[in-house]
Amino acid sequence: MLEIADFIPSKYNNTIDRGSFSWSAPSNIALVKYWGKKDKQIPANPSVSFTLNNCKTITSLAFAKKQNDGNFSFDLLFEGKPKEDFKPKIQKFLERVEVYLPFLKDYHFTIDTQNTFPHSSGIASSASGMAALAMNFMSLEKALNPAMTEEYFLSKASFLARLGSGSACRSVKGQVVVWGNQSNIKRSTDLYGVEYPYEIHPVFNNFQDTILLVDKGEKQVSSTVGHDLMHNHPFAERRFAQAHENLDKLIPVFKNGDLEEFIKIVESEALTLHAMMMTSLPYFILMKPNTLQIINAIWKFRNETKIPVCFTLDAGANVHVLYPNEFKENVLQFIKAELVGYCQNGQYLCDEIGNGALSN
Ligand code: DP6
């Protein structure tokens, strides 16, 4: 396991004047949710997620040597066009990671980024975006230090992505990623995401996630504010303990493919996440009426057909519908017949479990 000190490099052997890299990184969907953090993006509880395959950010990083004048210098393009609104988040990210990437002020960067999912679909691009950017910076660091191991590269990319957005650290690798220290999961750490290290039943192969876009509007309360409201939250300590318990319960479930138990844990996690929002001060609700309509329709369908389909939610109104690949046809038919009407403009995205970031 790597420690923080391992991520502070000593002198680099190589020099490089200019060049460019390009990486894609996917989004991920948490089964056990990260909600609440300590200082420096350290999670208050561990989480586990499925890495997705289709919802991705593709980011290229061009770099050219400059005088180190003590400032960061970068242009930010979204879909090829300058995007000033994204710059403060990147500036903050660079400030946070500078100690781990001491070359950052030696270059001018052009960061060009785009998503495979529709802009303003309500799908958060912070996880995939920060992961893709972190991979690019690691490619540059590897050019400066070619002896770097693959394991170091990936762990540090996840560590850096975490400093951009917590859940981003789970988007570097696939297919099931654990972030946060959990005593029963070897090598798990608060510092970066690790591939789930134990047996996973084949029922999870190509597991499907159909994302129903219920509300594409700007969220009233950001995740960052929501995390913060877990400080002094009346149920915080119990909730953090419960996340550990649920993660432990998933270990045999991943092994034996017990979907009944899987569904109980995953749906309870989703509703607990939203219960935390509803019981914080100030309280808030991110679900919409159609979120509840969809949940009820899924429960009815599951009861009637015995098809093991369930839902999860992230910090928003959209619903992720999770189910084994073998039921894809039936579930998609059900979605088209009964759920599409609850989606904004009838929009939904078909995704499935995937393998993590890729170099382009
Ligand atoms: C509800 O990773 O978006 O999706 O670390 O402040 O950037 P920051 O928060 P973020 O929080 C995601 C929370 C969640 C649950 C999860 O993905 O585990």
Image (spheres, rainbow, N blue to C red):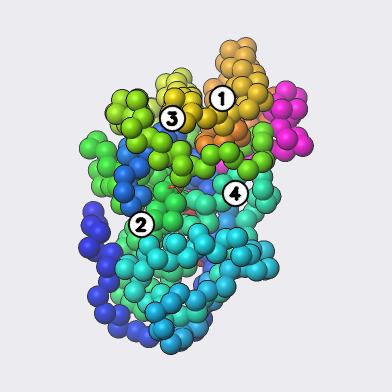
**Front disc: 1 or 4:** 4
Q: Distance between the residues labelled 2 and 3?
A: 31 Å
Q: Earlier in the sequence, mark 1 or mark 2?
A: 2
Q: Distance between the residues labelled 1 and 2?
A: 33 Å
Q: Which of marks 2 and 4 is nearer the N terminus?
A: 4
Q: Which amino acid does label 3 sit on?
A: Leu
Q: Which mark is residue 281?
A: 3
Mark 1 residue element: loop
Q: Which amino acid does label 4 sit on?
A: Cys
Within 10 angstroms of label 3, few (less than 14), some, or many (20 or more) residues? some
Which quadrant of the structure image shows residue 200? top left
Q: Does the stretch in magenta take in 353? A: yes
**Front disc: 2 or 3:** 3
* Residue labelled 3 has its Cβ within 8 Å of some atom of ligand 1: no
In the rendered image, which residue does mark 1 sit on?
A: 309
Q: What residue type is labelled 2?
A: Phe
Q: How far apart are marks 1 and 3 (CA)?
A: 33 Å
Residues 200 and 137: in front is 137
Which residues are drawn in magenta?
335-355
In the rendered image, which residue does mark 4 sit on?
A: 55
x 38%, y 85%: residue: 15
Q: Which of marks 2 and 3 is nearer the N terminus?
A: 2
- Marks 2/4 in contact by CB < 8 Å: the verdict is no
- Marks 1/4 in contact by CB < 8 Å: the verdict is no
Say whether residue 345 is visible.
yes
Mark 2 residue element: helix
Q: How far apart are marks 3 and 4 (CA)?
A: 33 Å
